[in-house]
Image: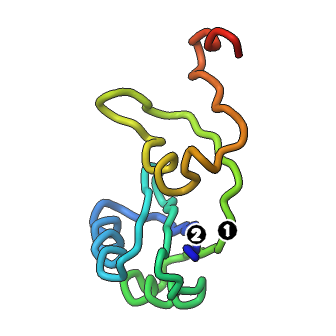
Amino acid sequence: MARHFVFGIANTDSIADTLVVAHLKALNLNWWHWLPNYWLVIDNADTHTCASLRRSLDTLLPQVNKLVLEVQPIDWAGLGPRNDKQNMFLWLQEYWIPPHRITTPMPPPLGLPPLPGK
């Protein structure tokens, strides 16, 4: 069964982000990173723990404050781009909590009227 993690890595820049992306790819992990210093990570092979991921991040970014949490995703909400060119939530809908697991309908984006019959 897949394991879900949330990473917080203090004060990263684009160089550090590139290192983290390459590292996650090498570990065969799936990730989402739309917000600075904040990562959602899925381990589909169920091979990592919070401690093992934190240790591996320490090799990339020693002496940088970080936190790794394992979570069981139940629900989420966000505000950000959601259109044909950019969709901040597509990965979340497809991987984090696929649509078939969401039990309540998502509200329309702010400023739009609700769908008929809702």
* Residue at (58, 53) in percent of width and height: 97
**Secondary structure type for disc 1:** strand
Cα–Cα gap, marks 1 and 2: 6 Å
Quarter of the image that includes the C terminus: top right
Q: Amino acid at mark 2?
A: His
Q: Residues within 10 Å of mark 2 (few under 14, many from 20)?
A: many
Quarter of the image that includes the N terminus: bottom right
* Residue at (69, 11) in percent of width and height: 117
Q: Amino acid at mark 1?
A: Val
Q: On screen, 99 above or below 86? A: below
Q: Of 36 and 34, which appears nearest the observer?
A: 34
- Disc 1 or 2, which lies upstream in sequence? 2
Q: Of 114 and 117, which appears nearest the observer?
A: 117
Q: Quadrant of residue 25?
A: bottom left
- Is disc 1 in contact with disc 2, using a CB cutoff of under 8 Å? yes
In this rendering, the count of numbered labels is 2
* Residue at (51, 62) in percent of width and height: 40
Image coordinates for residue 103, horizontal then vertical, percent: 71, 42
Q: On screen, 82 above or below 28? A: above
Numbered mark located on residue 26 in the image: none
Image coordinates for residue 93, horizontal then vertical, percent: 51, 46
Q: Which residue is mark 2?
A: 4
Q: On screen, 85 above or below 12? A: above
Image coordinates for residue 77, horizontal then vertical, percent: 64, 41
**Secondary structure type for disc 2:** strand
Q: Which residue is mark 1?
A: 71
Image coordinates for residue 82, horizontal then vertical, percent: 44, 30
* Residue at (32, 69) in percent of width and height: 21
Q: Quadrant of residue 107?
A: top right
